[in-house]
Image (cartoon, grey):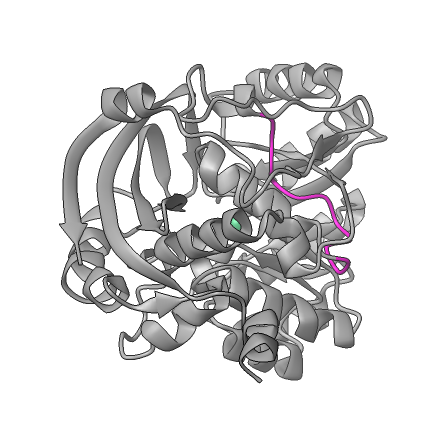
Amino acid sequence: MGWMYHAWQGVKMKIKRVDQYVIEMPLKHPFVTSMGREEIVPKVITAVYADGLVGWGEAPVGAQPVYTAETVETCWHVQHTMLIPALLGSDVARGRDAGGLFERVRGHQMAKAGLEMALWDLEGRSKGRSVSSLLGGTRVQVEVGVSVGVQDSLSMLIDRIADFWSAGYRRIKIKIKPGWDAQIVAAVRAEFPAARLMADANSAYSLDDAPMLRLLDDHDLIMVEQPLAYDDLLDHAQLQAQLRTALCLDESITTPRRAREALALQSCRIINIKPARVGGLSAARAIHDLCLEQTVPVWCGGLLESGIGRASNLAVASLPGFTLPGDISATDRYWREDIIEEEFVLNSDSTIDVPQGPGLGVTVLPDRLEQFAVRCEVYRA
Ligand code: MG
């Protein structure tokens, strides 16, 4: 009986140590959305040690609570006071065990997701399997696109997109906001008739803007992403009923339950799954499974991740229901220097390879981490 249990459950690992870092990475180019401008991107990185192995995780939290309510400070605090103490000394075998360990803490999805990612990495390393294979991924390359922020002028936007187009990106997402919307989308469509285009408003509109949003129907967009309030489902359902273009929800989907509610209310026809926003890889997979069952397409969004989070996003996007290209650009789209050794590059068919090595399949560079670190704490069982 004993061996059967182990074969099924996986060998348990005792968590001996956790390292927690705040790092700040300088972007190659400032990134502007309806929420603001970013030049330095902070993150909380964690390393979880067990059985001579180390797993890495990233919480892509902002300095300010403008995308979600979480910030670097809240993430640090919740990991420090609740999540890391729950992990230390515990016996875990699998990434999915994090859900039970962290159950007492409400919300704080990114704080949980960062540590959960490290457990998936550890599990993969201990079994010699990639996180993609542990999750049930079916692709070795995933189709990707690029997200282009608000620019100072239309001609700058066109130039920027032209650069990405010649680099090989075939799906282009543009950020919109009041005053930078229907006309801009029309101009981009005229310039790039073959592009798979989408527009992301990051909650910049209300239902009163429905007449303007209906104008977007003329430009053959794959989707309009999160036009209304960041925590809304009902108004989006009303707007979706008035549009031909599919609405996609991002900010509103924070848990598998919210995804189920959104589908029941017909608030959207597409879901953007960001594992960090929904509490980690297990929740991301649960939302994927639900959408696959209901034939709702999903895709993987990005949060200006370092190579650690990028590797994790690629693993998630290898699941069969991720039928739309993700916001998972090549390393050089955002960074001159990343904290991992490997570089993600764009293939000629607008895809990126899913890492196949054990765990997340990437190697963290200690010197680079040190260079970007502004805070570090070591916890031992
Ligand atoms: Mg978005």
Describe residue 264's horizontal placement relative to residue 57 as left or right: right
The N terminus is located in which quarter?
bottom right
At 46% across and 67% down in the image, what residue appears?
A: 254
Where's residue 253, x and y in %? 51, 67
Which sits in the foreground, 256 or 243? 256
From which residue to which does the magenta span run? Answer: 320-330
Where's residue 247, x and y in %? 66, 61
Query: Taking 46 as reference, is 81 above or below it?
Result: below
At 16% across and 44% down in the image, what residue appears?
A: 378
- Asked if residue 74 can be seen in this view, the reply is yes
Which sits in the foreground, 10 or 66? 10
- Please identify the quarter of the rendering in which residue 332 is found: top right
At 48% across and 62% down in the image, what residue appears?
A: 95
Describe residue 305's horizontal placement relative to residue 9 as left or right: left
Q: What is the chief secondary structure element of the magenta stretch? A: loop
User: Does residue 108 show up magenta in the picture?
Assistant: no
Query: Taking 137 as reference, is 185 above or below it?
Result: above
Describe residue 114's horizontal placement relative to residue 188 as left or right: left
Where's residue 315, x and y in %? 62, 48
Describe residue 86's horizontal placement relative to residue 368 as left or right: left
At 63% across and 14% down in the image, what residue appears?
A: 159
Where's residue 98, x and y in %? 40, 68
- Please identify the quarter of the rendering in which residue 97 is found: bottom left
